[in-house]
Each structure stands twice: as structure tokens, then as C-alpha cells.
Image (tube, helix red, strand yellow):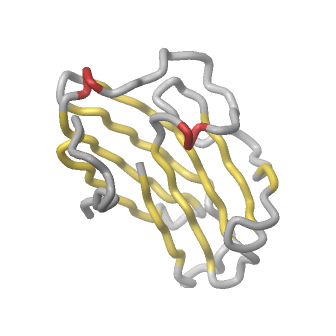
Amino acid sequence: MQLQTHPQSPPGPVRRIEVRAESTGEGRVNIAWRLSGDVSRLLIPAAADVARADGLWRHTCFEAFAAGSDWPGYREFNFSPSGAWAAYAFAGYRAGMAPLMLDQPPAARWRQSVDELVLDAELPLAGPRRGEPLRLALAA
């Protein structure tokens, strides 16, 4: 699927962002974001240790929002090219935010070239009963 630019966004260095998501069937979802454009014009944070951090949405990051039919609220994941990540549980739309406790950080692998920034992530989204739909909203 191709992400759409916000209508009020001025033209910039990003030409296209494509995202692919698939369930592993084992309580995990693999998501791949592929940003194409003039990557040298993006403000990409320097690489750092893989660590949980807040406020990543204020800078260059890729995001996934997930809701299951039997979950209260939804979950949000943020990934920065620096290696920082965040995971939250929300009780409702932008309400009741709390850190989503995980046994281990979500797996994330970044690749960067002159004209692409790619993230492959594996999200721990166990929750919906087997066969129940999982709704995803993806952003960058």
C-alpha cells in the first residue's frame, strides 16, 4: 500500500512511501516501510543504542497503530532510524496512554541509501484471538 501525503504538506524530498504488512500467525506482525526520495535532505538522527524513548513522533519516525476487536483501545509503535523505539497502550482515541510493557524490544532493521530509507519491523501483537481481525494504521 502507498501512504498518502497530508494535503497541507508542501512538496519535499520524499517522493513515495510504501508499506507492506503481514501476520506471522504467531502473534506477531511484520511491517516493511520503504521511503523513496532524496534521503540526504531528510533530518535523520544519528545511530544510537536500541532503547525505548518518548517523543519520537516529533521527528523522523515510522509509526504503526494496531487495534484488535477484543482489545480495549489500541497500541502504538514508533521507530526512529537512530534505533530508538516506543510502544504505548491507549484506552481510547488519544486517551489513557501508558507504556506498553514488552518482554523484549520490537525487532527493527533499518537500511539507508541515497534514495531509500527502509525499515523492516516485527511487532509483538499477540492479543486478538486466532482468526479475529487486526486493524492497522501506518504512518511516517
Picture layout, residue 72 above or below residue 38: below
Residue 115 is left or right of residue 85, and the answer is left
Q: Residue at x 56, y 43 (%)?
A: 57
Residue 10 left/right relative to 136: left
Q: Residue at x 72, y 77 (%)?
A: 71
Q: Nearer the viewer, residue 134 or 72?
A: 72
Task: Look at the picture and state if 58 lies above or below 45.
Answer: below
Q: Which of the pair 6/130 is nearer the observer?
A: 6
Residue 7, percent from left and from top: 30, 62
Image quarter (top left, top right, bottom left or bottom right) of the N terminus? bottom left
Residue 106 appears anywhere in the view: yes
State left or right for residue 97 relative to residue 41.
Answer: right
| Viewer can see residue 107 | no
Residue 66 position by quadrant? bottom right
Q: Determine the residue positioned at 30% across, 59% down.
A: 3
Q: In the rendered image, which quarter is residue 120 located in?
A: top left
